[in-house]
Image (cartoon, helix red, strand yellow):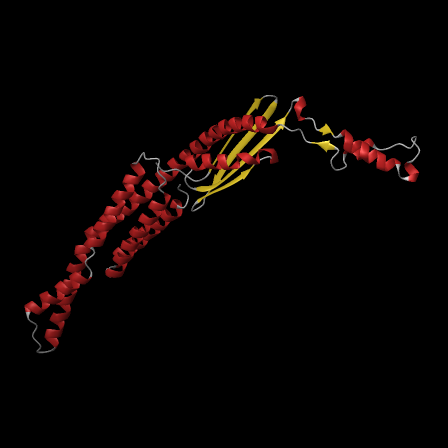
Amino acid sequence: MIRSMTGYGEASTHADGAHYFLDVRSLNNKYFKAVIRLPDEFQGLEAELESRLRERVSRGSVTLTARCSDESASAAYEVNHKALAKYVEQIRAVPQFAASSVPIDIGALLALPGVLQPPSHGEERLHAAKAVFRGLLDTALDALIAMREHEGRALTADFRQLSAFIAERLVQIAARAPEVVVEYERRLKARIEQMLRESDVKVEAVDLIREIAAYAERIDIAEETKRLGGHLDQFGGFLDSRDDKPMGRTIDFLAQEMLREANTIASKSPDAAISRWTVEIKGAIDRIKEQAANVE
């Protein structure tokens, strides 16, 4: 199955008074690359989430972003009374603040290092978040893969059009190739007849046949057109496959082989029509290579 490397998915839920949100987006990349952004308290989940990404996404640059907003009372920061008392004691030791009537800005005190301590949820909170984020990741990946498959169907349709175009040009080339030899034979005979009229030189029929045969051998493109047709058949097999294995690199390699055969046809045939059709084939193959860069 052809799948694009571009996709997006998201999921969210409420659990134990907290709101969890996760999104996954992917872009083209030759290899698999994961960028995972988690709240500091959940950094311990990074390895497991990346492992899950690798299980379901084979290729592409994937960015996972997760957030958690705790709406329960347990989200409140705790006041470190000993640290706060120590700060107040030190402030009162300053002469201008010695009088108890001098006001002290509580807000400024709370902003001092160590006064407010983040809530300590411990391993229990991390374990709960692990289950929630894993479920959200699977849901988001379902949406991302569905988008990849939708774009993959559009790529498949484009590939089919390009393949049909190449096949059509190959039929024209195969039909034209024998005519090139016939035209060469006709031109060669006309040239020899003119030379014979202008001189007393005699040309043996066997020599003429030998020259025509050598020319036909030099410009014979039957093998190349057959191989290119075989590559097209293999390409069609990839497009019809329901296999979930990534195909982007395989299609790119196959396109290189198709281009190699097209270049050989262009170099061997002196015919203008065949050269024009070969240029069109090479343009279609380049298009396949460009699109293959978008395939997982």
The quarter of the displayed image where residue 198 is located? bottom left
Could you tell me residue 210's position as x and y percent?
A: 10, 66
Q: Residue furthest bottom?
A: 200
The front one of 274 and 153 is 153
- Quadrant into which the N terminus falls: top left
Q: Is residue 121 above or below residue 248?
A: above
Question: Seen in the image, is 77 located left or right of residue 221?
Answer: right
Answer whether residue 168 is visible to the viewer in this image: no
In the displayed structure image, the side of residue 219 where residue 236 appears, left or right: right
Residue 110, percent from left and from top: 77, 33
How many numbered callouts?
Answer: 0
Q: Position of residue 30 (x, y in %)?
A: 42, 47
Q: Residue at x 57, y 36 (%)?
A: 43
The correct choice, above or below, for 226 with respect to 211 in the image is above
Q: Position of residue 100 (x, y in %)?
A: 91, 31
Q: For this view, does 194 lie left or right of residue 46?
A: left
Q: At 27% from the left edge and 61% from the top edge, which residue is drawn? A: 267
Q: Nearer the viewer, residue 243 or 284?
A: 243
Q: Nearer the viewer, residue 273 or 61?
A: 61
Image quadrant in which the C terminus is located: top left
Please tell me in which quadrant of the rendered image residue 122 appears.
top right
Give the side of residue 128 with respect to residue 244, left or right.
Answer: right
Q: Which residue corresponds to the image point at 15% horizontal and 67% vertical from the top-left?
A: 188
Residue closer to the observer: 32 or 248: 32
Quarter occupied by residue 94? top right
Please say if 258 is above or below 218: above
Q: Residue at x 32, y 40 (%)?
A: 160
Let me know if residue 256 appears in the view. Answer: yes
